[in-house]
Image (cartoon, helix red, strand yellow):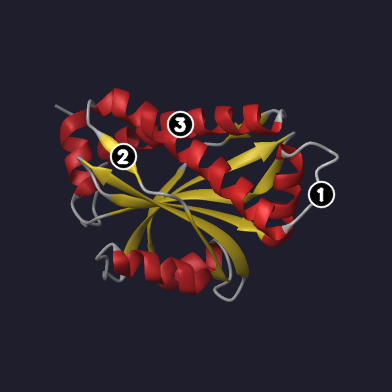
Amino acid sequence: MKSNYSAMELDVLKEIINIGGGHAATSLSQLIDKPVHMTVPVIEMMAYEDVYEQIMAEETVIKAIVIKMMGDAEGVFLFTVDQQFSKDLVSMMLPDDTPYSEAMADSALQELVNILVNSFLNAVMKLMDRNLVTSVPLIIEDMFGAIMSSIYIEQNQYDDSIMIIKNEFYYLGDRLESSLYFVPKPGIIEKMLQVLTV
């Protein structure tokens, strides 16, 4: 993956991620029946150490839901959520009289992320006229650094600098302790830009 994208290329990429993320935020609002908004997405090249300094400490234990994107483009969506907020998020989704269990919470979280990612991709497919499908969501609980590094290596990204593509969600002005990341296979961003800038 190249590290010197032009301002126009970054603007195009940011716009497509913004549109997809907006659809995901709308889906999240409908699921928890509360207004959820999204800020302008983060898209930048970072060294690995900067990721852990600026985004989240490497040793922070989180829950992450991983969904692979396949078809005309490949990559991985990674939804990370703070452990306490994952419980709050699940309680928003389930009826008040539902007894809480880890199994039910994990299932609800996986379904939520499945809807988020597919809402995101449906918007992107309309823009790009490309066929994209997703895998079954996989839930992981581990340190943020271990999850991030394994995902990037799995996507054959071994560069010193990595592209961070991240959407953050807000409720009543407060940041929800969760983020949606997209980790593309090498060359996918360039292919997306070719389609969108012709």
Q: Could you tell me if residue 90 is visible in this image?
A: yes
* 170 or 133, nearer to the observer: 133
Q: How far apart are marks 1 and 3 (CA)?
A: 29 Å
* 40 or 93, nearer to the observer: 93
Determine the secondary structure under disc 3: helix
* Residue located at (31% from left, 69% from top): 153
Q: Residues within 10 Å of mark 2 (few under 14, many from 20)?
A: some
Residue 71: % across, % down: 22, 42
* Residue located at (63% from left, 27% from top): 30
Q: Residue 99 has which mark? A: 1
* Residue located at (74% from left, 56% from top): 101
Q: Mark 2 points at which residue?
A: 133
Q: How crowded is mark 3: few (under 14 residues within 10 Å), some or many (20 or more)?
A: many
- 192 relative to 148, above or below: above
- 191 relative to 63, above or below: above
Residue type at the position of mark 1: Pro
Q: Mark 3 points at which residue?
A: 119
**Which is closer to the viewer, label 2 or label 3?**
2
Residue extending furthest toward the top? 126
Q: Could you tell me if residue 47 is visible in this image?
A: no
Q: Is residue 145 left or right of residue 73?
A: right
